[in-house]
Image: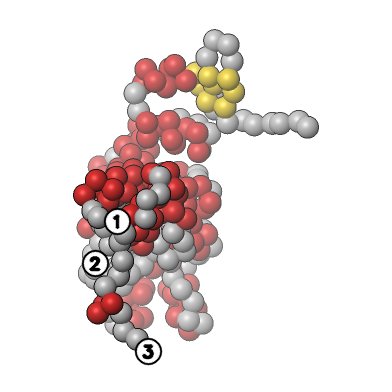
Amino acid sequence: MEYKTSISKMTKKDHIIRGQKLSDLVKAGSFSDSVYLILRGKKPSKKESRIFEAMLTISIDHGMGTSSSLTSRFVMSTGNSLNTAVGAGILALGDQHGGAIEKAMDQLATVDDAESFVEKAVKDKEVIYGFGHKVYKDEDPRVKQLSAICEEEKFDSMFIDEAFAIEKALEEKKGKKICLNVDGFMAAVLLEMGFSAEAGRGVFIIARTPGLVAQAVEEKENEKPVRRVNEEDIEYS
């Protein structure tokens, strides 16, 4: 069998990552830049570096109540190992939680005109990925933060412009604000950076994993086994 890869290679003198010496990456001292390099195949520019790091940080954890965090905690509470609990949390990520970035990237890449896109999607009752949030109704504060960084860095993107145009068209069509959420904004940024949609889902997995580790460790250290839903919280139908 032949094995081919352009990702990495171990040599006697050094380890090579996408054509870069691992020792040089260590000296540079930026984990997020190395993540960008290994996924994208090239080093980020200065502005891309700052924005990409901000996206990883902003996705690191969104509370104990998320599906992935609860999954990691429940699995950890039954006496499993850390890697099993964290792996379970990662497996809990799906199209409705963590996978919206990939879906939004696939969708946003096909939009030529926001108004006609929204018109057709609403008419056909199609899901518009990257919009709406259970907690944030008028504005996702994470989008506001990332958008401000993009403006500071003069990171112009037709995909970001299109995403906000869809938000406006949705409000006009629905008669109420359905905000662009962090998944939709990240989808626009990652498209502009040249990432594939599948790699976009991977970016979220990488960003969320430290949070899942923290959730699982806290569960083991602070909570009693075995976690269970209270019967009074379950409605029998």
Is 217 left, or right, of 48 in this rendering?
left
Q: Nearer the viewer, mark 3 or mark 1?
A: 1
Give percent across and percent down for residue 201.
47, 52
The percent position of residue 222, horizontal first and vertical second, equals: 21, 49
Classed neighbour count for the residue bearing mark 1: other residues with Cα under 10 Å, few (<14), some (14–19), many (≥20): some
User: For the view shown, which residue lies furthest in the right direction?
Assistant: 1
Q: What residue sits 59% from the left and 23% below the top?
A: 9
State which tag comes first along the sequence, 3 or 2: 2
Residue at the spot of label 1: 225
**Cα–Cα gap, marks 1 and 2:** 33 Å
Front residue of 139 and 99: 99
**Does residue 88 show up?**
yes
Q: Are marks 1 and 2 in contact (CB under 8 Å)?
A: no
- Residue 218: x and y in percent read 25, 47
Residue at the spot x=64%, y=31% of the render? 5
CA gap, disc 3 and disc 2: 31 Å
Q: Name the residue under label 2.
A: 136
The three-letter amino acid code for the residue at tag 2 is: Tyr
Pick whichever of labels 3 and 1 is earlier in the sequence: 1
**Residue positioned 36% across, 62% down in the render:** 67
Q: Would you say residue 183 is visible in this rendering?
A: no
Asked which colour scheme the image uses, the reply is secondary structure
Q: In this view, does 176 lie above or below 22?
A: below
Residue drawn where x is 33% and y is 81% of the image: 174
Report the label total.
3
Q: Compared to 125, does 12 lie above or below?
A: above
Q: For the residue labelled by badge 1, is the local secondary structure a helix, a strand or a loop? A: loop
**Mark 1: which amino acid?**
Pro
Q: In which quarter of the image is the C terminus?
A: bottom left
Residue under label 3, please give it.
237
